[in-house]
Image (cartoon, grey):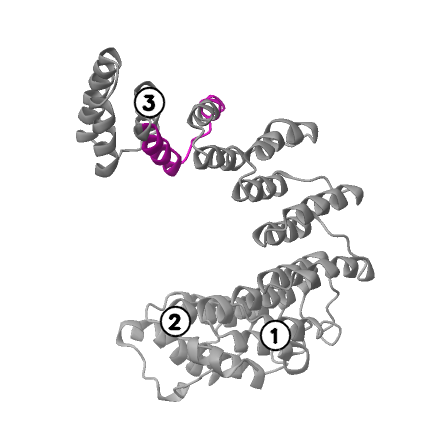
Amino acid sequence: MLSRSTSSSRPLLRLIRKPLSTIPPSSVDSEVLKKLNSKDWLAPNEVLKVFENLRDPTSVIVALRRYSSRRDYKPNEALYTLSINILARAKMFDAVDGIMDRVRAEKGSCRLSDEFFYNVIKIYGNAAGRVNRAIQTLYDMPAEFGVWPSVKSFNFVLNLLVSWKLFEFVHEVYVKAPELGVEIDACCLNIMVKGLCKSGNLDAALNLLDEFPKQRCKPNERTFSTLMHALCKAGKLDDAFRLLERMEEEGISPDTVAFNILISGLRKQGRVDEGMDILERTMQLKGCDPSEASYQEVLYGLIDEERFVEAKELMGRMILKGMNPSFISYKSMISGLCRENSVEDLDWILMQMVRQGFVPRMGMWRQIVWAVLSGHSHGKASRSNRFLMDCLTDCTQL
């Protein structure tokens, strides 16, 4: 299903299996495995206890083989799940394939839920990187195992493909929804929107907004935030603002994430004052509390434009609100203030930085010392020298 270039760069579906019957028992688990040789009838919870007490993952395969030869053999979902999880933690994914083959062969011997297959699909997709196996397991659920996948399992596979940037296969899985008995929901459509945005197909992503009512779904904050982020990344900031208007027209209140995306987009275009207006006025009017990230984006914009006095004021407001400016903010402020020989402001920034637990690095200390020693006012220099010595003392004690 996947392209040749993809299969060569990621470990997808090249299965080299060792027959389960050839794996010898582990000596560390010999005593535990003896329980399965007993002629006494074993209850399902006793069998689970045996598997839970195994220390060597390879012993799981031996235990399954021994248990399956017993007259009281009665596999269940808990046993299969436990065995698969143990093998997955040990990265024995070929052995997981072997257990799934056993489950397929023993179809009807026990009832399995969608949750079981969701766990297997997650293991194949996240832990093993075998995307083909994850997709095939989803496809096989109704026909091979008699279990209809839930929308959660379906959406996980869709999102997995987007995460791996296998965009050409996202639509292929999406159109399988009716065949798999899956009813499309807003989360599913959001994943499709994300995939189209990440692949650079913005027009198709925007057109997908019209698909929501057709599927009896409503777009939500995440839908619009994903689209606005893609538009801002593409430099289409005005389109992003128009999308904000549409969002409100459809009765969806913009959240902090949406405003942060717009503030970040404005900053990247050098429109810092508009970003400050959103931070200080628009968000308040919309009843949306700015987050630390909101302030941080505006702060970065002010620093980018070398508006250090305003940046210092904003940092002060952040600190009063219990927010912590980033290390990069302090580093950039110190570099800019050193260039301007602004010793008093440098004094304050350095003090806040140390109070926050950041330790200036050697390159920053060189800049600070040079700025202090070249200060125009002897009074300023002496005060900063005293503070500088205190900071150096504190840092050497860390």
Residue at 67% x, 66% y: name it.
150
- Circle 1 packing at 10 Å, graded few (<14), some (14-19), many (20+), is some
Q: Which residue is mark 3?
A: 342
Q: Which residue is mark 1?
A: 169
Q: Report if the CB atoms under discs 2 and 3 are less than 8 Å apart.
A: no
Residue 318, label in figure: none
Residue 192 located left or right of residue 294: right
| Amino acid marked by disc 3 | Ser
| Amino acid marked by disc 1 | Phe
Residue 86 located left or right of residue 132: left
Q: Nearer the viewer, residue 233 or 315?
A: 233
* Mark 1 vs mark 3: in front: 3
Residue at 63% x, 51% y: name it.
236
Q: Report if the CB atoms under discs 2 and 1 are less than 8 Å apart.
A: no
| Amino acid marked by disc 2 | Lys
* Mark 2 vs mark 1: in front: 1
Report, in whole angstroms, how far the alpha carbon at label 2 lies from the one at label 3: 57 Å
> Main SS of the magenta segment?
helix
Residue at 75% x, 73% y: name it.
178
- Circle 2 packing at 10 Å, graded few (<14), some (14-19), many (20+), is some
Q: Position of residue 174 (x, y in %)?
A: 68, 70
- Please give the range of residues in magenta: 316-337
Q: How many marks?
A: 3
Mark 1 and mark 3 lie on one chain; the one further toward the N terminus is 1
Q: Nearer the viewer, residue 17 or 311?
A: 311
Q: Which residue is mark 2?
A: 91
Residue at 60% x, 63% y: name it.
200
Label 1: which secondary element: helix
Mark 2 and mark 1 lie on one chain; the one further toward the N terminus is 2
Residue 376 located left or right of residue 160: left
